[in-house]
Image (tube, grey):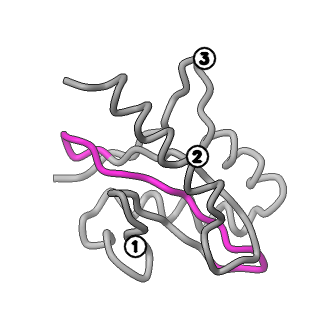
Amino acid sequence: MEFTVEFYETDSGRFPVRDFLDRLKETGPNDFAAIMAGLAKLKNRQYHRPPLSKPIGDDLFELRHVGKLNTRVFYFFAKGQRIITVHGVRNKAREIPAGDLKVALERKSDWLARNAS
């Protein structure tokens, strides 16, 4: 069974990861293509491990593409074979900036609270 990849939606109807990808398409088209290919691969369970994907703690995972800047998309797994993308970031650092991790965790918590079943 395939997984579906979905974008987190804010209370106000924004899709932060989709917005991030739209900007990335303009500023780094090669990185955009690599991330989109990675997101497509995540639909298949065999790619839910390094080098494409790795756990970063608190049931969050990252899809990472290394280029001039590291491009990351953070996500978590939800019931029903769903992958929910919650945050995207580009930077030169090897480590995940604490602020970006906090945003990803807050969005995950928000999604879970609003989609509890």
Q: Secondary structure at mark 1?
A: strand
Q: Residue at x 34, y 27 (%)?
A: 113
Please provide the residue range marked out in magenta: 66-82
User: Percent from the top left, x then y, of residue 93?
Assistant: 71, 77
Of the numbered discs in the image, which one, if any, rests on residue 12? Answer: 3
Q: Nearer the viewer, mark 2 or mark 1?
A: 2
**SS of the residue under disc 3:** loop
What is the three-letter code of the residue carrying label 3? Ser
| Residue drawn at (36%, 58%) of the image | 58
Secondary structure found at label 2? helix
In the rendering, which numbered label is found on residue 103? 2
Identify the amino acid type marked 1: Lys
Number of labels in the image equals 3
Q: Is residue 50 left or right of residue 63?
A: left
Name the dominant secondary structure of the magenta segment.
Answer: strand
Where 77 sits versus 95, above or below?
above
Residue 11: image x %, image y %? 54, 19
Compare marks 2 and 1 and give the one earlier in the sequence.
Answer: 1
Q: Which image quadrant for residue 59? A: bottom left
Label 1 vs label 3: CA separation? 30 Å
Q: Amino acid at mark 2?
A: Val
